[in-house]
Amino acid sequence: MIYFLKRILFFVPSLLLISIVVFFLTKMSPGSPLSDQFSSEELDYKQEQENIKALRKAYKLDLPLFYCSLYRASSSDTLYKIADLNVKKSLTSLAYEIGYWEPINNFYAAVKTELFRTKSPSERRILVKLLNFETIKQLTDFTFEYNHIFSELDNITSSITLISNIKKSNFRNYFFKVNWNGFNNQYHHWIANFIKGDFGHSYVDRQSVSNKITKALKWTVSLSLISILLAYLIAVPTAIYSAANEGSFLDRLFSTVFFGLYAIPSFWLGSLCIIFLTSETYLPLFPTYGVGEVPTTASTFEIIYIRISHLFLPVFIWTYGAFAFIYRQLRASLLNQMQTDYYLAASAKGLSKRSLLLKHALRNSLLPMITLFGSLFPALISGSFVVEYLFSIPGMGKLTIDSFLSRDYPIIYGILLLAAALTLFGNLVADILYQWADPRLNISEKSNN
Amino acid sequence: MITLVFLISCRPVSKNNNIDYITIWQAQDSKGINPIFVRDAFSNYLCMQIFQPLTAIDFRSEEVVGVLAMEAPEVENLDSNRKKITFQLRPSAAFDKEHAISAKDVIFSVKLHLLKIPASTTSQRFDFIEAVTVHPEDSMRIDFIVEDQSNVDFYCGAIQLMPQHIYDPNNILDQFSIEMLKNNDTYKSLELKTYIGFFTQLKFSQSQEYIYGSGPYYIESWKKDQNILLKKKSNWYGDKLSKENSYFEAKPSLIRYEIIDDEQAAIISLKSGKIDLLSGISAKSYHSLKGGNNNNYTLYSSPKLGYNCIGFNLENKFLSNLQLRKALAHSIDKELILEIIFYNLGKTTNVPMAAIRQEYYNNTLIPYQYDLQKAIEILDNAQIIDHNNDGWREMEVEGKMEKVELTYEYNANNKERERIGIILKNNAKKIGIDIDVRPLEWNVYLQKLRDGYTEIFYSAVSSSWLPPNFEGSFHSTAIKKGRNYFNYKNEKVDAIIDEMNQTEDKQKYKSLIMDFQLKIHQDVVGIFLFSNEHTFVVSNTLNGFYTSNQRPNYWAPSLEKLNEK
């Protein structure tokens, strides 16, 4: 019992650790949720920056990432305030070259001032370009090239002159500073809201994350549960039969059929099913796509009928690959048990084959099944992108891929943390089941000892 | 048990035989239907059917026609920098029976379009509007005072009208003038902050009851990622104007957009009679449908105004060499690519523009014909030769001989771009140039393009009917901060582009655009391949279909369903 309590308590730090990893990995991935929000051509810089600022504020992207930050002595702890990733990269690179941040910051401030002042689009473009160079040589060459413009912008030219004439101090690049940002940071806001059950809002369509996940989960969990149930219902009895009748015609038939199915890629079989079983050209037995349109006046039977007809093919495509996997594991495990001394002794004592298999061998063969069962929990919500895409089912697989592609961070975080929580939960359930299946595995005692 | 479930679930597929019920395939759902926040093409198309602008390009004639305005506006130059654009509103125009459209609605809608809201896609676009006033003698006549810029009259007319009784029931925006809304200090006002909070509520983009305009349709139901059903308004004012232009054609009483991710499933649904129209299917599917039994449907295609190209990064140590770029241009067989990858659905081009734009297209340019022998000669003459006899050419870079190795990058999962890359690689190999073909995840690819770090890239650019503006793609100031992924820098071209954007003289513009094309062609900034065609598969149960160069190349409300006998 204490062991399980410990495991449950272990959940919290594990989840927090996972949340940190998820948060940073997502932040480090290229692209930005705001990158498509503005086309920076032909627009007023001030207006563009104000809109970006407002959006960053709304999404809390204008805060430091974490409680503390580690940065080079030649860099700054306030770089997170710069929205444009290219500008950030460019300024960091210039600071790295000279070893100081302050002259670079002055240069940035001077360019920004001019950008806010200018009304000329061409001048604006030239000024913006100034913030995109990564070496001092490029910067000075460019200012030389556009001397007719920069000669009148004293603040900028003097700051560039300072940068190019400064005595470089490369050693400062090898010293790091740590800064404490406090609780007003992006991670803290996100995790605090997450704990309160507020997963935030999608960057793409501004819908609440929990609402989007719940809607998608409805279909994915239904499909997963039916698939898992079906896979076990079919694979377990056939595995028992095959083990009991090893080498028989049916044993060979099951193996051939299941492994044959296992070898077929689901997207290919799914496409074939759509072509041959939904098309009028062949056998229009099932609907081609979707989950079905239920009229408001439909009876329960009608609803079931509509859903079953729409979900039959997706469930089949989702499930068939699992038959062989479960079947192979259980059959091999049962055959192993049938070679053991206790099985032979019980058999010699005259126990029926049915009783031997179901009461003794099966229970001892369950360990690999339990391991498999534990891993099914995250699969419950992860969905299958292939099945959902082929049959146009608005489930979790599709939501996850779409969110990754559009860098919709709140949804990505929500899904990944949910999957992590279910993985931890699945492992705990598996531990409990191990002990039930084989009391010799007294995990609690072992852990106490 | 399983057999029983199988038997229950088997049922013959029923056809969509509803008269006036048009079902159209859509690959992805709308992200939100609000003219102020609209970002994706499908949402924009839905907005066109729900809301109406003052003027727009007619789908049939492809000319500016009056929608809520009677006709195209009158334009008057006030001074060198400002213009007055005058619209005469249609007297019969109305949101519904109780809400006729007046100049007040135009002013309200302009304010909404200018409102500085995070994620607004319109506030910057319409920033040129300085004031809007109602004519003192005619309350249906409205004047826009605007900063002068190209096509400003067209942009003014593009403002979609939104009813104040839905989007601002307490008339809060009446307290703020356009001038005030353009001033940042105004946004400190509590009333305005409250209003922005109200207007940015999700319901105004996602809930059918709150998405309403003067267009022929409203949203009857919206099942996210499944379907959207548009219903025709009863007694719509535009019914009496159906002969005027395409925006008053609204024949079906219901239009259903069915979201189906898989194109193959959509085609099967069309064949089964569940879908009536497919728009924008792949060239491969279009070709296979063309060869099949097509008693149930008809195929159409419409030229797109954009172009496809293989772009070169001119800052690359090898690609900065003009002769190498010329040799690569001679190693690509555009006609062959168009034939085998796009099944001849398109027309080749030599410049960054569709060849069908005859008014602007420079026909005098001599194309870089597919000629590997010529490519080899160019490379030999440029001293890019195989010095060590390993089959690959070397080039002198900063005093050292280096093997010419390049990378072609494209967005992963785009099979057409991948195949073009493989053709480029194979042909380049024949002339001794080593090109690696590398797929990149979309965001990574986009970021790399924006940063100007790609070597050879694939680009497809869309375009509108308006006179082309190349500032964002070929002006040196658009490097890293625009779409000049070529890192192309040419002072003469910069000057031509600047002049093109300033001139109001159409003849001068034409002369400049010819010069621009000549320079781009001479500099071999990229290999400009072709412009594609938009594809359609239309069920024969539909009547009234026509294609248009105006995106999305067809007008769904013009369709009607024939009664099947």
Image (cartoon, coloured by chain):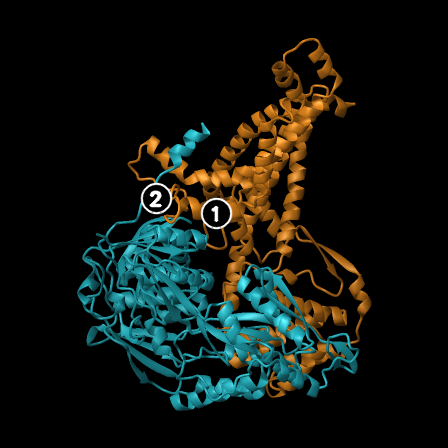
Asked which secondary structure carries label 1, the reply is helix
Residue underneath mark 2? B13
Q: Is residue B257 left or right of residue B92?
A: right
Q: Colour of chain B?
A: cyan
Query: Which amino acid type is shown beneath numbered disc 2?
Result: Val
- Rendered position, A179 above or below B145: above
| Distance between mark 1 and mark 2 Cα atoms | 17 Å
In x, y percent, where is residue A68? 69, 52
In x, y percent, where is residue B419? 57, 65
- Which chain comes out orange in the rendered image? A
Q: What label does residue A272 carry, if any?
A: 1
Give the chain of mark 2.
B
Instruction: Tell me the quadrant of the picture where the N terminus of chain B can be found.
Output: top left
Q: Is residue B158 left or right of residue B405?
A: left
Query: Which amino acid type is shown beneath numbered disc 1?
Result: Leu
Q: Residue at x 56, y 46 (%)?
A: A265
Q: Residue at x 60, y 42 (%)?
A: A263
Q: Let me know if marks 1 and 2 both belong to one chain.
A: no
The residue carrying pointer 1 sits among few (fewer than 14), some (14 to 19) or many (20 or more) residues within 10 Å by Cα, namely few
In x, y percent, where is residue A29? 63, 56
- Rendered position, A378 above or below B564: above
Asked which secondary structure carries label 2, the reply is loop
Q: Nearer the viewer, residue A316 or A158?
A: A316
Q: Nearer the viewer, residue A33 or A278?
A: A278
Give the chain of mark 1.
A
The residue carrying pointer 2 sits among few (fewer than 14), some (14 to 19) or many (20 or more) residues within 10 Å by Cα, namely some
- The answer, for residue B162, to whether it is visible in the render is no
- The answer, for residue A408, to whether it is visible in the render is yes
- Rendered position, A388 above or below B83: above
Q: Is residue A168 left or right of residue A119?
A: right
